[in-house]
Amino acid sequence: MNSIQPNSPASVAGTEAADRADFTQIRYAQCWEDADILLDALAVREGDVCLSIASAGDNSFSLLTQNPAKVIAVDLNSAQLACAALRKAAYARLDHAQLLELVGSLPCEARAALYARCRPDMSEPSRQFWDARPELIAAGIGSAGKFERYFTLFRTRVLPWIHTRRRVDALLAGGNIEDRRRFYNSTWCTWRWRLLFRVFFSRTVMGRLGRDPAFFQYVQGSVSRRIMARSRHALTELNPADNPYLQWILTGRHTTALPHALRPENFDAIRRNLDRIEFQNCSIEEYLSGHPDERIDRMNLSDIFEYMSEPNYHALLDLLVRRAGPAARLAYWNMLVPRSRPPAMAGRLRPLADLAERLFQQDKAFFYSRFVVEEVA
């Protein structure tokens, strides 16, 4: 049966995070998952139906570059959908450079005028949302979320106590892997870096200033230690000159790299396929319940399973597999809570572990502890 009963485990899964966390503000003004590895993992085929956690919209727009039949971008938070709606209007109304200016990747003194050009293409609720927040537009909409403000605080209040701007620029210049490792060990990884990193990226500080404390309910162990290890990988094994996420954290803009959805070579493909994306202000379960005949081929699930108990995660995963098309793929991240296919689903869902691990080693968004790719058997 495709419908979801009101008190079933699946229906509980979709509301668990909403019951414990605040979904009235912009949490993420950008997508902080690497779309490059997402697209490699999902291998979207022309004509596929994609289900995607909307967040700020970036990775859902990246899916459009693969010419799917449809991208269903779902989010419980209407503020996140307002972010995605403004981006959609920007792709339609602005040129590539103006899009970067509106986001904040490039400096701009006329963002209010850019917003005015986008405004007619937006729904009334989205217009009302942004009309009431001109200061967020003026600062660049890519800095408007709680998570981005957390990084702004780190960049402006903490980082100057650790490294000079010249040293930050030297890190972001990259270089070959031997030079990067030498710079990290001899210059970057000081006692101040280690100490203040542990404090600022602790469960307490991140929960209060960056994410919602409710998102840490199922986390065990040291948060900062895990992120420190991944940050070392991003600063040495990967090239900072190619990392837009690291660049934004340390400078507040994109310097020498852009995330997939903002690159000039992807702009026209996204604009051409804008009519194939739809936004849904609901949970995944609610969407699937209201569209019982919909079959999903590719699923970008962000890190939503982190916020669910294990039984609720299993229930939602079971629902997604039941509603999946042949050889459908799912991709999602573990940040701090381990989540992957339970043994009971071994005959229905198979892990693509080698692919996932290879892509994880390339992941430029270095907060996550694991990348999971699974395929419906």
Image (cartoon, grey):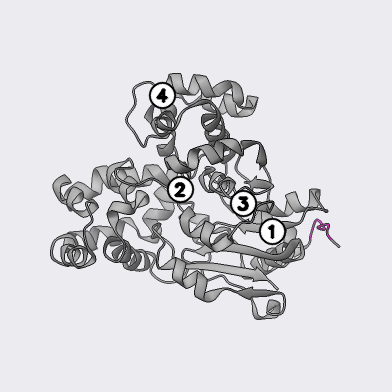
Q: Amino acid at mark 2?
A: His
- Circle 2 packing at 10 Å, graded few (<14), some (14-19), many (20+), is many
Q: CA distance from mark 4 to mark 3?
A: 28 Å
Going 36% across and 60% down the picture, which residue do you hit?
202
Residue under pointer 3: 52
Q: Secondary structure at mark 4?
A: helix
Residue 369 appears in the rendering: no
Residue under pointer 2: 260
Query: Residue 4 magenta-drawn?
Result: yes
Query: Residue 209 magenta-drawn?
Result: no
Q: Residue 297 bears which disc, if any? A: 1
Q: Secondary structure at mark 2?
A: helix
Q: Secondary structure at mark 1?
A: strand
The percent coordinates of residue 56 (x first, y second) are 52, 42
- Circle 1 packing at 10 Å, graded few (<14), some (14-19), many (20+), is many
* Viewer-nearest of discs 3 and 1: 1
First to last magenta residue range: 2-7
